[in-house]
Amino acid sequence: MKKKVLTVDDSRTIRNMLLVTLNNAGFETIQAEDGVEGLEVLEGANPDVIVTDINMPRLDGFGFIEGVRRNEKYRAVPILVLTTESDAEKKNRARQAGATGWIVKPFDPAKLIDAIERVTA
Amino acid sequence: MDMNEIKEIFFQECEEQLAELESGLLKLNDGDRDPETVNAVFRAVHSIKGGAGAFGLDDLVSFAHVFETTLDCVRSNKLEPSQDVLKVMLKSADVLADLVSASRDGGSVEESRTRTLVKELEALANGEAPPAAHAEAPKPAAAKAEAAKPTDDSGFEPVPFTFEGFGDDEEPAVQGSTYEISFKPRRELYSKGNEAALLLRDLSRLGEMSINCDMDALPDLDKMDPEDSYFSWKVSIKTSKSEDDIRSVFEFAEWDCDLEVKLAAADARDEELPMVPVPFDLSALDETPIAEEKPASAPVAAVSKPASAAPARAEKKESPAAAAAAAAQNNAAAAAAAAGQTIRVDLDRVDRLINLVGELVINQAMLSQSVVENDATGTSAVNMGLEELQQLTREIQDSVMAIRAQPVKPVFQRMSRIVREVADMVGKSIRLVTEGENTEVDKTVIDKIAEPLTHMIRNAVDHGIESPEKREAAGKDPEGTIKLTAKHRSGRILIELQDDGGGINRERVRQKAIDNDLISPDANLSDEEIDNLIFAPGFSTADAISDISGRGVGMDVVKRSIQALGGRISISSRPGLGSTFTMSLPLTLAVLDGMVVTVAGQTLVVPLTAIVETLQPEASAIHSFGATQRLISIRNSFCPLVDVGRILNFRATQANPVEGVALLVESEGGGQRALMVDAIQGQRQVVIKSLEANYTHVPGIAAATILGDGRVALILDVDAVVAASRGQSMKPEMSLAATG
């Protein structure tokens, strides 16, 4: 069974990089452009792991993570925060919202894959 | 998709973000305090930084970081976005745009500009915000010299994601130490999607370990909360890695567990105690009631032995090709669902479609004509079908043109930067107001108006608007205003450039024209005629050509490039109140409204925009002037008569004007000419076919088209013909730039 990754990022560049990286590593990838869309596709996507950006229009990463954690079915899905924020405050907020871990951009593909494998069985 | 394609996407996205950034900053400048505006501005810079980081564009990253830090102060209300602050930010946006261009095209940005702005931005960020840790020492600018280590001097230091632990044998293989780890997860650890079992699995990859699970806290089944955490582990691991490496395994979890890592007592004493590695296998725990009752967090179910973990990882990577193919399918579906409102299409495809539709229009016209010729019009079914076809063709044509239509916004936004820069250079304070930025026009038109518009804006800032002192003395707002407006009017786009400056100095313009031999000293000119002199070739109003609007190009070049687009430009000016330039342009360069005329048996098309009126000359109105020149008197003024057939060498002698039709056209410099043609066939929209692309440039001819009968008709280059009639040679650059 291929693992399914839901990525949520408003940057087309990053979305494409995630797509290429994840596909090359043999993941199935579903993409959303912001938190609102992320929550919309969540149900049908049924992901094994979620990778999300923080700064996004409409609904930011914090709000999105909280939304996922409120969903009875997906509240235990590992969520990795993909962001350029390196300061502890943002990481903490993400953690309080329910993030599992984080990857600091600029990510290198190997690190992204490792992080995903780290939080998934 | 490869990295280069993604990079291309990145630069496209940068353009969008830069536009977003600028429009957001301008909104803030106008007093908009909507938090979403600030957020959008912040996000734009943030996004650029994120993508730039992924491509290792260090100059861009470090500048974007400083910019972003300052914007963050605004976002968190630590910094009030005053006019002064926004001035720095707008300049920074310009530098950011330049850095993006430099990264794309391989150029470079003046280091001093970057450095100055970095300092100003940092000053803003530190001025009111508590000084950030990295701001204490004066930092070197984030410029090229430091490009090697940009992350350090900008304070932007990505926390490395430490996975060096896995199979990374770079570190010297020391004998290894034994650590004792006590790990007690709290329930929060599970609720955030972390897994004790996975953490232990990762830990096991660091070396040989033995593990001991403490289940004492486990209550009776009826008292058990499936969400809670009851287990804790004691691990003893022999590894060559450091304590930090061990701790980094728990990087995601350290807040939500009690973790203790220490060197084993024996190890501390430097005594190698033989340690018996206990096989690490928690699969037995699968059967425990805990696992059954904790479906959400199931801490143990997934744990496998280190021995089996490795093959499992390898398996996953075995069929990447098949996986990618399947994933691609899924993605296509997902993307289609997600895309929603817009799609991106390669411009070539649209151009091809436009060409095809052009062929279709011609084909349809030919079909209609042959039906008429074969007198099949009597059949009402054929007639109706033909009419419907005609309507559909027209509709398809309009729809396809609409695909290419784009708002003028990007060009207008570029202008605001030019106003800022030039105003700065000449020490004026000028506000650019834009209106109707969403007016749409064909992309080729947009691409081609940017240059003349830039030149006109420079002119308006440099010559149009007075210095603040002069303005104040005249009782005006010291800050000048330039207004740029776009609107649709009768199938054309109207672009107006209005300044509230001093207006055209007619005395000076007149004097200059006399000095340059453009007019005779005793010429009697109306105000309007004087104003229009600035479009005359070789005219420049500035006493000294400045490096801003000088550049060796005058308004005549602007006028010519507007005309090359099939457009017109006019000026109206009121002394002391300012000037308004009005440009009227076709919405597309692919089709043209033309008057189809006959000249010496040939069919020609004259662009409708050039024609002021048509008239049937009477013998009494024709006056000879010199050997060959003839004039026609129209409403008591004389206008040179130009025989198109003669100019184009269709015939050897001039035709009798009374037998033909005169087309009164407006030519370069505002003067009028009457073009003599034999007859008018009608008025029609024609598809422009480039003559240069298919044949070669022909003087006096702008382009060609294909008529309904399948014959090629030439489109007249009115300005070139008029120029030829003046005895000048027909210059190729005056020809109408044709597409298609």
Image (cartoon, coloured by chain):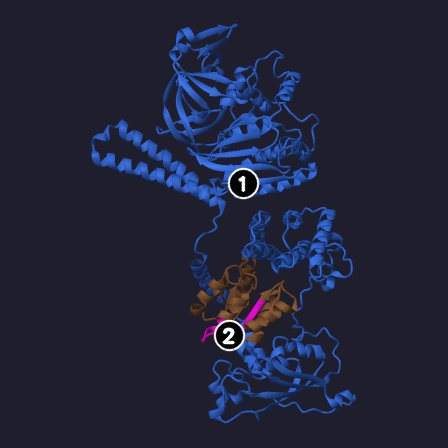
Chain colours: A brown, B blue
| Residue at 46% from the left image edge and 65% from the top image edge | B326
Please, is residue B599 above or below residue B168 in the view?
Answer: above
Kindly state the secondary structure of the residue where label 1 is placed: strand
**Residue A80 counted in the magenta span:** yes
Closer mark to the observer between disc 1 and disc 2: 1
Q: Report the Cα–Cα distance between label 1 and label 2.
A: 48 Å
Q: B354 and B150: which one is in front?
A: B150
Q: Which residue is mark 1?
A: B434
Kindly state the secondary structure of the residue where label 2 is placed: loop
Q: Which residue is mark 2?
A: A77
The tag on residue B86 is none
Please, is residue B296 above or below residue B558 in the view?
Answer: below
Quarter of the image holding residue B660?
Answer: top left
Residue stretch in magenta? A68-81
Q: Amino acid at mark 1?
A: Thr
Residue B697: x %, y % from top left: 52, 27
Q: Amino acid at mark 2?
A: Val
Quarter of the image holding residue B178?
Answer: bottom right
Q: Residues within 10 Å of mark 2 (few under 14, many from 20)?
A: many
**Residue B303 counted in the magenta span:** no
